Amino acid sequence: AFIFSMFGFTEAWAKNSDFIIEKGVLKEYKGNSKNVKIPNTVKSIGDFAFYGCSGIKKVTIPDSVKTIGKSAFDSCTNLTSISIPNSVKSIGENAFANCDNLKSVSLSDNIKTIDNSTFYFCSNLKKITIPANVKSIGREAFFGCFSLKEVKFLGNKMTSIGDNAFVTVRV
């Protein structure tokens, strides 16, 4: 693990042995660091790769990542923010579901779909900007996002919004 100490502040980062990576797919995270920097050898974050990793607060996704699998970060209850780089073209359903403390999300400009239940019960998510290239938002994509007060649509390519996508949102 890399440890950074300045002015008495110590931050430990995950080490490469904490990851199971096969042919560019991050299959599983086995570590217990609060801060995770995914190696730039990863091309895809696999289904359930970080499922239930409740100790994680911060994840850095490199530009090498093209896809995020279903339920990849589901139930990472202490994850507070996520920035998805523009290299990412698709995000699977339930990818960030049940991330109770997720407050801010920056989405890739290159995704075309926000899949079913992607941010399901991210109850502390405050605002979201939907990139211009997004054409569809899946069923229950933002269901249970009770703190979501601002939804900004950057484009006009939207062709469908699934059932209950924003049903509990009070915008």
Image: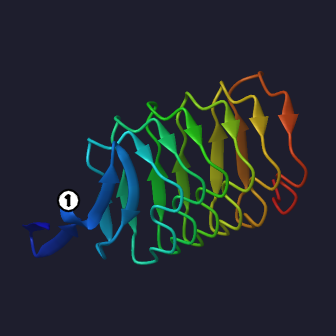
Look at the numbered disc 1 and give the secondary structure of its residue.
Answer: helix
Q: How many marks?
A: 1
Q: Is residue 88 above or below residue 31?
A: above
Note whether 91 is above or below 119 in the view shown.
above
Disc 1 crowd, CA 10 A, few/some/many (<14, 14-19, 20+): some
Identified at 91% across, 50% down, the residue is: 163
Give coordinates of residue 103: x percent, y percent: 55, 62
Q: Is residue 81 left or right of residue 1?
A: right
What is the three-letter code of the residue carrying label 1?
Asn
Kindly identify the residue that appears in the image at 57 percent across and 72 percent down: 75
In this rendering, the answer to whether 158 lies above or below 53 is above
Q: Is residue 168 shown to the viewer in this render?
A: yes
Q: Residue 149 appears at what percent x and percent y?
A: 73, 56
Q: Do we see residue 15 in this rendering?
A: no
Rendered location of residue 158, percent (x, y):
80, 28
* Disc 1: which residue: 16
Question: Vertical placement of 137 versus 166: above or below?
Answer: above
- Residue drawn at (64%, 52%) of the image: 127
